[in-house]
Image: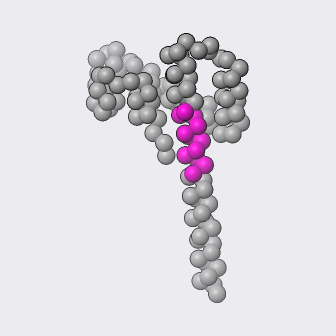
Amino acid sequence: MFTWFRHRAIDRELTGLLDDHARVRADATMVRDFLLRVLEDNRNGVEKFSDEALAESTEIIDQVGPGAFYWMCDIAAQMVTLSQASLQGLSTNVSVELGAQASAQEIVQLVVRLP
């Protein structure tokens, strides 16, 4: 009987971990997709800070919390570091993996790795 309870507890704990991982991955995907959307909007000349974009960003912050804001800032910092390295003629893992003709979307997909 004790073994059965122990197995049930382990099953519950494992299920909880898998659920947490799925939630984190979904949240990370939502943030990455928003970043790609902003990138596409910028490329197409869409109005910055539109009501639609702000509503979507509010929804993300409400769902994910302050971690989303921090993660977006961290992504921006990584992009600045990549730009600085490029301007200084330094090679980065991004330039090595993607080459000189990489698109902005490809760079985001490489830099923003999901858990």
**Rendered location of residue 74, percent (x, y):** 52, 30
**Rendered location of residue 2, percent (x, y):** 63, 84
Name the residue at 28% across, 17% down: 89
**Rendered location of residue 69, percent (x, y):** 62, 31
**Rendered location of residue 70, percent (x, y):** 59, 32
**Position of residue 115 in the picture relative to residue 52 (left or right):** left
Between 24 and 89, which is closer to the camera in this rendering? 24
Name the residue at 44% across, 27% down: 105
- Where 105 falls versus 113 (above or below)? above
**Position of residue 11 in the picture relative to residue 98 (left or right):** right
**What is the span of residues highlighted in magenta in the rendered image?**
22-33
**Position of residue 35 in the picture relative to residue 53 (left or right):** left
Numbered marks: total: 0
Find residue 71 and report its image quarter: top right
Find residue 8 and report its image quarter: bottom right
- Where 50 falls versus 13 (above or below)? above
